[in-house]
Amino acid sequence: MSETLLAALSKPQMFGNRSQLKTWLIGILKHKIIDLIRSNARLVTAPDTASDDDGDDLDRLLFKADGHFAETPNDWGKPEETLRQAQFFQVLDACMERLPPALGRLFLMREWLELSSQEVCKELSITPTNLYVQLHRARLRLQECLNLHWFGGSRVSRSG
Amino acid sequence: MRTCRQAAALVIAREDRALSLPDNIALKLHLLACKACPNFENQVLTLRAAMGRWRNDGDEAIPTDPEP
């Protein structure tokens, strides 16, 4: 453990409040993870390209054969209004936890570690096409989860 | 003119890579003409903003009262 880290943990009152300490610690952890990944240490195995989705292909459920939306997407209103609400982030956390592990890992490498698409491909030994297909699935799943559990939408149905 | 399915795919793809110029133009034209896709775009942008906040602030929304 670094000297700085030890020093900080022994003097928590150095930080204005607990959340600043938490933010600082998470920042350090995040950068350590990024450094490990970039130094080519193999941390994660390549995701199982056999679908985690159990055939639940959101794309097919969301669109009709002619390419139109099966249902008009919900109007989520102004993002600023949504982000003002603490409970929204609890729902977002829950939705992220519901992602299949391989999708979640990949999504977090982009969205939390902020690795570039190329870096994610290199680390997971997948092609860019594969990456974009999986990110597409992850993003659609999150949106569908938020739509259902926050914005009052109804579940897409497997009709016809 | 692209279908909504194609436009939605481009809106999502844009989160992780640059679109080609023709795709960009086709998408913008579709968004002008379509009533459904701007709602979908707003969903994608909301998730983008939410992830930005989540990434920086963890589980906190905008700052509330300082801790006692």
Image: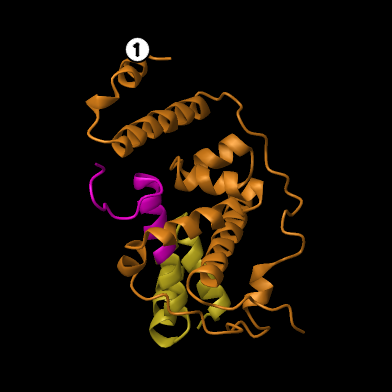
Locate the C terminus of chain A and report the quarter of the image it occupies. Answer: bottom right
In the rendered image, which quarter is residue A122 located in? top right
Q: Is residue A46 left or right of residue B9?
A: right
> Where residue B26 sits in the image (x, y, percent)?
44, 76
Q: Colour of chain A?
A: orange
> Where residue B12 sits in the image (x, y, percent)?
50, 64
Residue B52 magenta-drawn?
Answer: yes
Q: What's drawn in magenta, residue-wise?
A: B46-68
User: Is residue B18 in view from this perspective?
Assistant: no
| Residue at disc 1, secondary structure | helix
Three-letter residue code for mark 1: Glu
> Where residue A23 sits in the image (x, y, percent)?
34, 37
Tell me if mark 1 has few (under 14), some (14-19) or many (20+) residues whose alpha carbon lies within 10 angstroms of its own: few
> Can you say whether A78 is above or below B64 in the image?
below
| Residue bearing mark 1 | A3
Looking at this view, name the residue that lies furthest to the front: B68
* Chain of the residue under label 1: A
Residue at point 40% right, 73% down? B25
Residue B27 magenta-drawn?
Answer: no
Residue at point 43% right, 33% down? A30
Residue at point 35% right, 46% down? B57
Residue at point 45% right, 70% down? B43
